[in-house]
């Protein structure tokens, strides 16, 4: 196990009806609030009215930034920064999925920064402070509600890049599983794939002697697998939605499950390049690419893939070589993704081989990616080619 330091400052308020606690959470930060939300789902579901009612009860001055795109754009982030500066906003409140929360984080760190916010994504600067941020999560997927990461697209440059900062952690996040009942099926599937992928990125590691961390990872994967089909078949099954929601948060809340382990994260880097050009949903891209990454790298550490196959998928190793067991686990992953309705190939989402070189080059722009197996441009291209 490697040395580590861990601090997660986000207060989590979890459960039915917890939006009623919004006013008391907001008040200590001040009453000038920027409400950030997406393309309108919160208005259709009635959540917007509940939020406004809470904010009115403390006489808050509410400014709004609606229309945050899935794969949020830096142009929208800049608009939010302008509003915060002009209106002396004291708290940013993000109400939505990962895209809305990520945009709100970029706004929060961008407000006190003198340069352009895109500098953080060019690695020209690191956030030094941030406006306080609170969230109400409406879609289980990214873990953004309890981590310091944010991923933003620059549509003009056709780039999608991540950044992260201890300053970007939300101060509080309200997680009511009932708010996820209305998420379209496709996005529930994407979310399930995303949270499983977050675990994969941490679990497939070469760091030795991390048994507790590995079991944390396996327990999240097993819990997602056990609850996914019920959550999809019965969108209002509270227990299934609650379990999925908590798995999503635990899968990526500042790396708590994999402290002391080196993570990989190459597949996320590759997927972001696909979304940058084709604007596909992050989870859909991961469903396509992850099993191919697994096939490309499993020989680096067959024992970890054998452990994955036997503990997570209950593959019976009797009469099989280690390699056969490892491959059976990878196959089980693909079958599960297909069973819940995720795409399996780039052509399933209308993508051909036109931009493979561009995506591969961009994935390694800051150097080789991945820790489980270091990937260079040609490796990334091969994984993308396997995904066609
Ligand atoms: O925009 P609205 O109208 O709200 O609709 C959204 C959007 O169309 C809809 N939706 C959300 N909650 C809903 C709902 N519809 C009905 N009822 C509800 N309760 O769902 C659609 C997708 O939302 P989005 O926020 O884009 O999804 P997700 O949460 O999967 O976020 C994806 C973004 O997060 C980034 C991804 O790259 C992508 O840009 N990621 C962020 C991470 C982080 N901050 O830690 C890590 C991830 O690996 C990921 O990269
Ligand atoms: Zn992800």
Image (cartoon, rainbow, N blue to C red):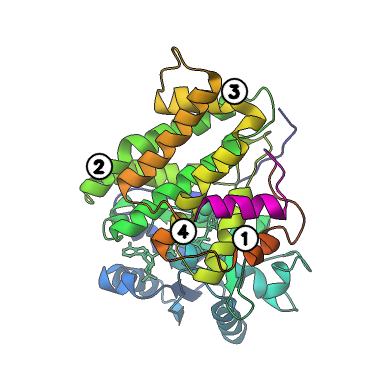
The quadrant where residue 35 appears: bottom left
Q: CA distance from mark 4 to mark 2?
A: 27 Å
**Mark before the other along the chain sequence, 4 or 2:** 2
Can the viewer see residue 246 in this picture? yes
Q: Which residue is mark 2?
A: 230
Proximity of marks 3 and 4: CB atoms separated by less than 8 Å: no
Near-viewer residue (131 or 161):
161
Residue with the mark numbered 3:
303
Closer to the camera: disc 3 or disc 1? Answer: 3
Q: In the figure, 36 relative to 83: above or below?
A: above
**Most distant residue in the top direction:** 318
Task: Calculate the distance from the C-alpha at mark 3 to the C-alpha at mark 4.
Answer: 29 Å
**Res 168 label:** 1
The answer to whether 271 is drawn above or below residue 232 in the figure is: below
SS state under label 2: helix
Query: Which residue is label 4 attached to?
Result: 346
Determine the residue positioned at 41% across, 51% down.
Answer: 344
333 vs 386, left or right, is left
Instruction: Find residue 196 and report its horizontal and vertical position in percent.
Output: 46, 43
């Amino acid at each position: 196990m490697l040395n580590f330091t861990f601090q997660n400052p986000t207060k989590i308020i979890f459960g039915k009806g917890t939006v009623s606690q919004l006013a008391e959470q907001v008040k200590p930060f001040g009453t000038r609030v920027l409400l950030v939300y997406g393309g309108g789902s919160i208005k259709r579901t009635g959540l917007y009215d509940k939020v406004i009612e809470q904010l009115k009860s403390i006489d808050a001055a509410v400014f709004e930034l609606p229309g945050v795109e899935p794969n949020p754009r830096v142009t929208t982030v800049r608009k939010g920064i302008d509003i915060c500066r002009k209106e002396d906003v004291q708290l940013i409140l993000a109400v939505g999925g990962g895209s809305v929360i990520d945009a709100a984080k970029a706004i929060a760190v961008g407000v006190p920064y003198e340069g352009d916010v895109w500098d953080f994504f060019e690695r020209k600067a690191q956030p030094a402070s941030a406006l306080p941020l609170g969230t109400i999560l409406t879609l289980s997927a990214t873990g953004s509600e309890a981590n310091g990461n944010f991923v933003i697209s620059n549509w003009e440059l056709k780039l999608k890049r991540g950044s992260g900062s201890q300053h970007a952690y939300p101060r509080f996040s309200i997680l009511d599983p009932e708010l996820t009942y209305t998420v379209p099926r496709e996005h529930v599937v994407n979310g399930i794939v995303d949270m499983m992928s977050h675990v994969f990125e941490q679990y497939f590691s070469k760091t030795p002697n991390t048994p507790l961390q590995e079991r944390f990872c396996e327990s999240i994967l097993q819990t997602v697998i056990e609850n996914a089909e019920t959550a999809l078949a019965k969108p209002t099954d509270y227990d299934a939605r609650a379990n999925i929601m908590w798995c999503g948060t635990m899968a990526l809340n500042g790396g708590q499950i994999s402290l002391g382990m080196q993570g990989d994260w190459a597949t996320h880097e590759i997927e972001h390049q696909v979304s940058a050009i084709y604007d596909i949903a992050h989870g859909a891209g991961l469903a396509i690419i992850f099993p191919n990454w697994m096939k490309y790298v499993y020989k680096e550490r067959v024992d970890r893939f054998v452990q994955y196959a036997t503990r997570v998928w209950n593959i019976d190793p009797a009469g099989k070589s280690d390699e056969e067991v490892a491959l059976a686990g990878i196959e089980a992953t693909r079958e599960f993704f297909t069973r819940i309705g995720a795409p399996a190939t780039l052509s399933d989402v209308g993508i051909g081989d036109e931009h493979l070189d561009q995506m591969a080059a961009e994935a390694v722009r800051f150097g080789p990616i991945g820790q489980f197996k270091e990937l260079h441009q040609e490796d990334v291209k091969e994984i993308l080619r396997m995904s066609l």
